[in-house]
């Protein structure tokens, strides 16, 4: 293998490694986004439940004072 072929081979390997690393980073970002989405959905459900509880408590209080 001459020097030119060796340089091309190294460049190809470097490109492949960079693509693999970029793919790995993209997958990690996707996983983080999915986790954040799930956390937000869970927080939203908890907030909704607390709001419903507060509404029921307010209705009970108002109903008790009639």
Image (cartoon, rainbow, N blue to C red):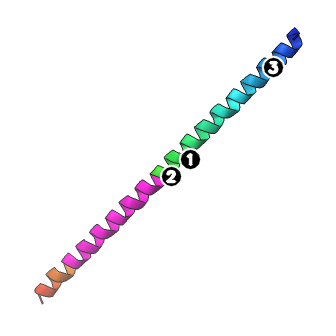
Residue tagged 2: 34
Quarter of the image where one finds residue 49:
bottom left
Q: Is residue 55 above or below residue 29?
A: below
Asked if marks 1 and 2 touch (Cβ < 8 Å), the reply is yes
Q: Which residues are magenta?
A: 36-57
Q: Is residue 51 magenta?
A: yes
Q: Give the Cα distance between marks 2 and 3.
A: 37 Å
Which residue: 20% across, 77% down? 58
Secondary structure of the residue carrying tag 2 is helix
Left or right, 8 with respect to 25, comes to right
Q: Residues within 10 Å of mark 1 (few under 14, many from 20)?
A: few
Q: Give the Cα distance between marks 3 and 1.
A: 31 Å
Secondary structure of the residue carrying tag 1 is helix
* Number of the label disc, if any, that sits on residue 30: 1
Task: Say whether disc 2 or disc 3 marks the residue closer to the N-terminus.
Answer: 3
The quarter of the image holding the C terminus is bottom left
Residue tagged 3: 9
Q: Is residue 34 above or below residue 21?
A: below
Q: Is residue 53 magenta?
A: yes
Q: Give the Cα distance between marks 1 and 2.
A: 6 Å
Q: Residues within 10 Å of mark 2 (few under 14, many from 20)?
A: few
């Amino acid at each position: 293998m001459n020097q030119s072929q060796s340089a091309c081979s190294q460049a190809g390997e470097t490109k492949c490694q960079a693509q693999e690393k970029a793919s790995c980073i993209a997958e990690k970002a996707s996983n983080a986004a999915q986790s954040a989405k799930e956390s937000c959905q869970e927080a939203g459900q908890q907030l909704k439940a607390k709001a419903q509880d507060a509404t029921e408590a307010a209705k009970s209080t108002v109903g008790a004072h009639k």
